[in-house]
């Protein structure tokens, strides 16, 4: 499967993190598989972890008076996860010079098989207005990212 975002050749590598989870009973349907509506929450687990790692988490946004609502979400289901199964959520933040955040997600089961992939696009809003430029704190992160002054991957 091809990636969700295209990057220019001079773009820095995506920022990444991986979160480990275990499927809880409340997340499965009567067929003992994760209900499809739970996957946005799994994506959220990845976004929160990556955001906190790089100073762009929800509390950071709140501190700067910026919101970042989801404009677009896509989920591609490949194979199911089951109750009690351990899985990982790999989250990638793709480079863009636009006033948005492009997240990609790869969920793998305990054997490393891809079970689900997806993406979200989040826009920046301040004072109920769509921001046409990156907020200063995000622009600063992007400068460091482009200069190679940020880690590009987390240890797995």
Image: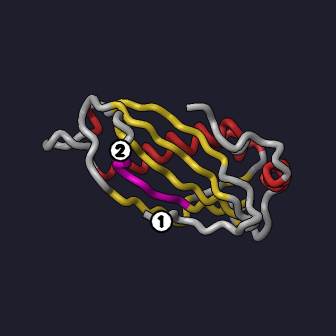
Q: SS for tag 1?
A: loop
Which residue does the image show at 74% across and 56% down from the upper left? 12
- The disc placed on residue 10 is none
Determine whether 45 is above or below 100 in the image.
Answer: above
Image quarter in which the C terminus is found: top right
Q: Residue 90 in the image: state x and y as whole percent.
A: 51, 43
Image location (x, y in percent) of residue 59: 68, 39
Q: How many labels does the image show?
A: 2
Disc 1: which residue = 2
Asked whether 118 falls inside the magenta stretch, the response is yes
**Magenta residues, as a range?**
113-120
111 versus 36 height, above or below: above
Disc 1 crowd rating (10 Å Cα; few below 14, some 14-19, many 20+) is few
Mark 2: which secondary structure? loop
Q: Distance between the residues labelled 1 and 2?
A: 16 Å
- Which mark is first along the chain, 2 or 1? 1
Magenta region, mostly helix, strand or loop?
Answer: strand
Label 1–label 2 contact, CB within 8 A: no
The residue that appears at 50% across and 45% down in the rendered structure is: 44
Q: In the rendered image, which quarter contains the N terminus?
A: bottom left
Nearest the camera: 124 or 104? 104
- Spot occupied by residue 150 in the image (x, y as percentages of width and height): 78, 42
Residue pointed to by mark 2: 113
Give the left or right position of residue 100, taking residue 136 as reference: left
């Amino acid at each position: 499967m091809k990636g969700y975002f295209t990057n220019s050749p001079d773009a820095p590598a995506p920022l990444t993190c991986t979160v480990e989870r275990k499927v809880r009973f409340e997340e499965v349907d009567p067929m003992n598989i994760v209900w499809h509506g739970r996957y946005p929450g799994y994506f959220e687990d990845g976004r929160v972890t990556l955001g906190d790692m790089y100073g762009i988490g929800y509390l950071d946004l709140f501190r700067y008076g910026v919101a970042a609502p989801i404009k677009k979400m896509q989920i591609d289901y490949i194979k199911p996860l089951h109750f009690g199964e351990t899985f990982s959520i790999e989250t990638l933040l793709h480079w863009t010079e636009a006033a948005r955040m492009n997240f990609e997600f790869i969920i793998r089961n305990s054997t490393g098989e891809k079970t689900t992939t997806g993406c979200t696009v989040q826009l920046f809003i301040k004072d109920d207005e769509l921001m046409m430029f990156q907020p200063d704190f995000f622009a600063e992160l992007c400068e460091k990212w482009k200069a190679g002054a940020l880690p590009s991957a987390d240890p797995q």
